[in-house]
Image (cartoon, coloured by chain):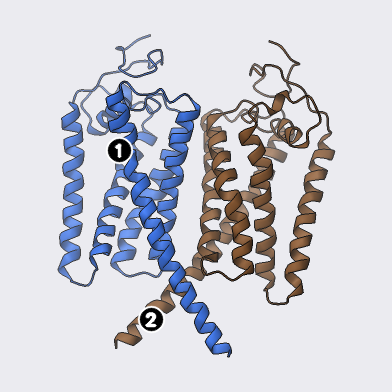
Chain colours: A brown, B blue
Amino acid sequence: MTGQPHPYVPRDMELKDFVPGFLSQSTIVGVYAISALLVVSVIWVFSGRSGKFSKLNRVLMCWWAFTGLTHIILEGYFVFSPEFYKVKTPHFLAEVWKEYSKGDSRYAGRDSGIVSVEGITAVFEGPASLLAVYAIATGKSYSYILQFAISLGQLYGTFVYYITALLDGDDFSASPFFYYAYYIFANFWWILIPSLIAMHCWKKICTAVKLQGSQKKTKTR
Amino acid sequence: MTGQPHPYVPRDMELKDFVPGFLSQSTIVGVYAISALLVVSVIWVFSGRSGKFSKLNRVLMCWWAFTGLTHIILEGYFVFSPEFYKVKTPHFLAEVWKEYSKGDSRYAGRDSGIVSVEGITAVFEGPASLLAVYAIATGKSYSYILQFAISLGQLYGTFVYYITALLDGDDFSASPFFYYAYYIFANFWWILIPSLIAMHCWKKICTAVKLQGSQKKTKTR
């Protein structure tokens, strides 16, 4: 085996030519948090200027911009960079996945379930999330069904993510800290928020369909 | 290794205590086809009696009953019977999966991606499909969004199914016949039909939302 020993679990996972991360955990999380805050702030400020958006829709636009860019940039990089763990420079995106793999080594190990879910997320859900920002901003009629579709995709992906881990022994974290901080806490938001949005859109759509149905009845009377 | 040699590919996959299938391919496919035809006929005849359903909605009810029962009975059995390949009697559901594994040995091999997707399909999408029959029959306002949600779930599952196979080498079929007949042809319908239904529901929902939006505008004028 060439390369340096990796910090991941299972310890005997083979990672030829592995190069350890260069940046500290606080740097990686900090850059991500600040970038996210920047995106959210820009959307929040611009969406507030016109005065035509409800607070809820402004929050939703912030979410879709944040999650869409995360899907496209972070997860997109992972999907199309199978050898990120060999990167010899402090490349931020490679560092993210070198670090995240401490919480779930299936990323470094290129588990096919993970790559499939991340692929669907990056290629379909990422661009669709940015489309959702546009759809809300311009009041498109497909706004609710699009948000519902992406949220359901995110939920499905997170379900597959956890179920495959459980079936394969749920032992891919380098320590309980990484297990709870990365594997549980970081993903938790992609269960909570899509669930809330899916329920919100479900209700909105049912109301619209019900209204249409009652009008048809009135007309035929 | 105990048990008899299995007919699956990869040949070196270990299946302790494997017992070959008892029923012929034509018997297995025949029983499934006749059962499906029976379900579809019953729904078609009963939905036609009242005269209040469109042909499209009658077809949709047939589809949801067929796919729902397939998810719950066939796929449900697979999910909760990890040792189906050891079954020593001609149990129909065990036979189905002993036979289908010739097209995709990941079923007999209990691949975690397959079990995750089939688990979500059997537990959530199966009952939801039967709910869709009821929703169409009783004209519920959630009918479209429910059908859309299940279709999207079916599409997501089929995508994960094929992408994981490709990533893992796409070599799980005992012969080209089984590859095309089981792995491609049988699953193809769960791409085609959910796509059509999802597009249909998307349009219906957009129309309803647009109508509601235009009425709001009229009111505020």
Q: Secondary structure at mark 1?
A: helix
Distance from disc 2 to disc 1, alpha carbons, whole Å, reads 40 Å
User: What is the chain letter for disc 1?
Assistant: B
User: What is the chain letter for disc 2?
Assistant: A
Residue B166, given in percent of the width and then of the height, sits at 46, 29
* B115 on left or right of A32: left
Asked if one can make out residue B16 in the rendered structure from this viewpoint, the answer is yes
The relative height of residue A6 versus residue B146 in the rendered view (above or below) is: above
Q: Amino acid at mark 2?
A: Ser
Q: Are marks 2 and 1 on the same chain?
A: no
* A35 on left or right of B67: right
Contact? badges 2 and 1 (CB < 8 Å): no
Q: Quadrant of residue A52?
A: bottom right
Q: Residue furthest bottom?
A: B221
Q: Which residue is mark 1?
A: B186
Q: Amino acid at mark 1?
A: Ala
What is the number of the mark on residue A214?
Answer: 2
What is the number of the mark on residue A102?
Answer: none
Residue B4, given in percent of the width and then of the height, sits at 29, 12
Q: Quadrant of residue B190?
A: top left
Q: Tell me the quadrant of the picture where the C terminus of chain B can be found.
A: bottom right
Residue B178, given in percent of the width and then of the height, sits at 29, 27
Q: Tell me the quadrant of the picture where the N terminus of chain B can be found.
A: top left
Asked if one can make out residue A191 in the rendered structure from this viewpoint, the answer is no
Q: Residues within 10 Å of mark 2 (few under 14, many from 20)?
A: few
The relative height of residue A55 versus residue A102 in the rendered view (above or below) is: below
> Which residue is drawn at the image coordinates 23% and 64% (left, top)?
B55
Q: Secondary structure at mark 2?
A: helix
The relative height of residue B203 versus residue B18 in the rendered view (above or below) is: below
* A50 on left or right of B198: right
Q: Quadrant of residue A80?
A: top right
> Which residue is drawn at the image coordinates 76% and 56% (left, top)?
A39
